[in-house]
Amino acid sequence: MFSIKSLFSKLFTSNGGQRIADDSHYLSLCCIVKDENDYLAEWLDYHRKIGVTHFFIYDNGSKKPIAETIDSLGLADIVTVTEIPGRNKHVKAYQHCLDHFGNSSRWIGFIDTDEFIVPKTGDADFTRQLKGYEPYGGLGLSWLIFGSNGHKTRPLGGQLESFTKRSDIDFLANKHIKSVVQPRYVQSAFKSHCFKYKPGYFCVNEHLIKIEDSFAEPSIDTVQLNHYYCRSLEEYQEKIKRGISDTKRERKLDEFYYHDGESNRVEDRTILEVLARAKTS
């Protein structure tokens, strides 16, 4: 008889299943990726600079194994890679992370490699901001969709310097949130954007307003989640080929033109300012 437990028992983890000590980390990140090897270095480097000390990456059948890329970056000691092939594995990966690695971290953020957490308190260290949310089950971060900046092909520079234009805050897609949770207060992974919490605990936004599901009015006063949804037209076409890990539907090129049409309206270099502060702190 098929069960989630039997599926998870077949997953291969890069650390050979070695247990990470309880409370080893204050903040870790978890993501599921497929053929995004070229984007990992920038994503890992940035989030290390804002206080993340471990990463749980689920490889959804990449042509070049993610573990090889991590080894080549010399980051195998801070990145745990687990292979999870097949379609629609987002929530299963998140549940595996909670079950097997949840005790290792006070907080785990569940985001994608085209999403970057941007603290806006003047302190580049996001962990200090999180301390104010310890009474709650999770913190919901509002999306800000970034556009292509007019790039048809992949630019030579990194995402953060190449894509600096975003949507207005009231763009409908920005109602999505992503979750940074305290595993000890989580009952289960529910959707790729939100979780079910144990009795007495729930997710809040930056101003401690309760968030019930995957959506909330955008709130970006003290933290925002830059979502580099579009990148360049060339990169979006590659994204279509990779498919979508949290649903069985196919991605359409029309979605690029719709999002990009709304997402080059505001110049937003906040993340570069955070990066500059992190380098000097």
Image (tube, helix red, strand yellow):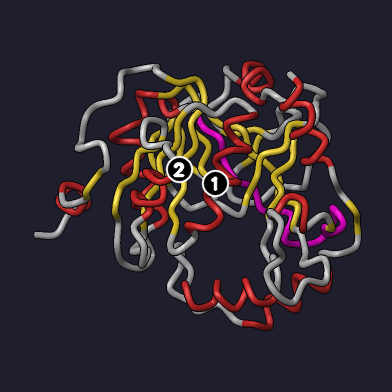
Q: Nearer the viewer, residue 74 or 245?
A: 74
Is 237 within the magenta? no
| Image-quadrant location for residue 235 | bottom right
List the residue tagged with mark 2.
73
For disc 2, the neighbor class at 10 Å (few under 14, some 14 to 19, many from 20) is few
Return the mark for residue 215.
none
Residue drawn 38% across and 65% down? Answer: 88
What percent of the width, then of the height, locates residue 255?
67, 77
Question: In which quadrant is the N terminus drawn?
Answer: bottom left
What percent of the width, then of the height, locates residue 124?
73, 26
Label 2: state its secondary structure: loop
Q: Is residue 246 above or below residue 137?
A: below
List the residue tagged with mark 1.
41
- Residue range in magenta is 166-181
Q: Is residue 110 above or below residue 107?
A: below
Question: In which quadrant is the C terminus drawn?
Answer: top right
| Image-quadrant location for residue 62 | bottom left
